[in-house]
């Protein structure tokens, strides 16, 4: 709590990534397994050589560290950031009604 009596809210950023993998699927299957073992990483369904991944981390620096780690994995050709969310997606409760 700060001097005004406000408690800061801890926001965990969620990042959506699209990985471009090597064309040889048999070579890059190991990458999927390594990603699944990392806490905070959710692996989606692979389509051809593209693999969607969601990352939840404690803060922006942790997101960047995971991004760099993923980019350094064997058979990962490129990492595209397709979405970053730093807040709550819940609708505002004070939205005026339209009549």
Image: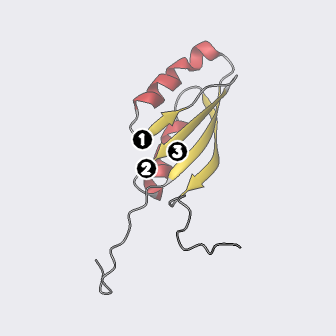
Residue topped by disc 1: 40
In the image, farthest residue toward the top = 26
60 to the left or right of 76: left
> How many angstroms separate mark 3 from mark 2 (CA)?
11 Å
The residue that mark 2 highlights is 57
Q: Residue at horizontal 50%, vertical 20%?
A: 30
* Mark 3 element type: helix
Secondary structure beneath label 1: loop
Nearer the observer, disc 3 or disc 2? Answer: 2
Give the alpha-carbon distance from disc 1 to disc 3, as whole Å: 12 Å
Q: Please tell me which residue is depicted at 48% across the width and 40% down the height of the picture.
A: 69
- Image label count: 3
User: On the picture, is 82 further left or further right than 14?
Assistant: right
Q: Residue at x 43, y 50 (%)?
A: 57
Image position, residue 45 (x, y; %):
60, 26
Q: Nearer the viewer, residue 64 or 16?
A: 16
Estimate the x, y position of residue 56 in percent, counting from the top left. Answer: 46, 47
Q: Residues within 10 Å of mark 3 (few under 14, many from 20)?
A: some
Q: Estimate the spatial distance between the alpha carbons at disc 1 and disc 2, rounded to whole Å.
A: 6 Å
Q: Does residue 6 lie above or below 79 as drawn? A: below
Density class for disc 1 (Cα within 10 Å; few <14, some 14-19, many ≥20) is some
- Residue tagged by mark 3? 67
Q: Which scheme is used to colour this image of the protein? A: secondary structure
Is tag 1's residue or tag 2's residue first in the polypeptide sequence?
Answer: 1
- For the residues labelled 1 and 2, say whether their Cβ atoms are less than 8 Å apart: yes
Graded by Cα atoms within 10 Å as few (under 14), some (14 to 19) or many (20 or more), the crowding at tag 2 reads: some
Residue 21 falls left or right of residue 55: right
């Amino acid at each position: 709590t700060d001097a005004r009596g406000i408690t800061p809210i801890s926001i965990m950023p969620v990042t959506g990534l699209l990985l471009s993998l090597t064309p040889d699927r048999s070579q890059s299957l190991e990458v999927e397994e390594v990603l699944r073992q990392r806490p905070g990483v959710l692996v989606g369904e692979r389509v051809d050589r593209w693999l969607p991944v969601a990352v939840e981390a404690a803060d922006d620096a942790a997101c960047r560290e995971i991004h760099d780690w993923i980019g350094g994995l064997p058979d990962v050709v490129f990492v595209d950031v397709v979405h970053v969310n730093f807040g709550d997606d819940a609708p505002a409760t004070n939205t005026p009604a339209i009549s």
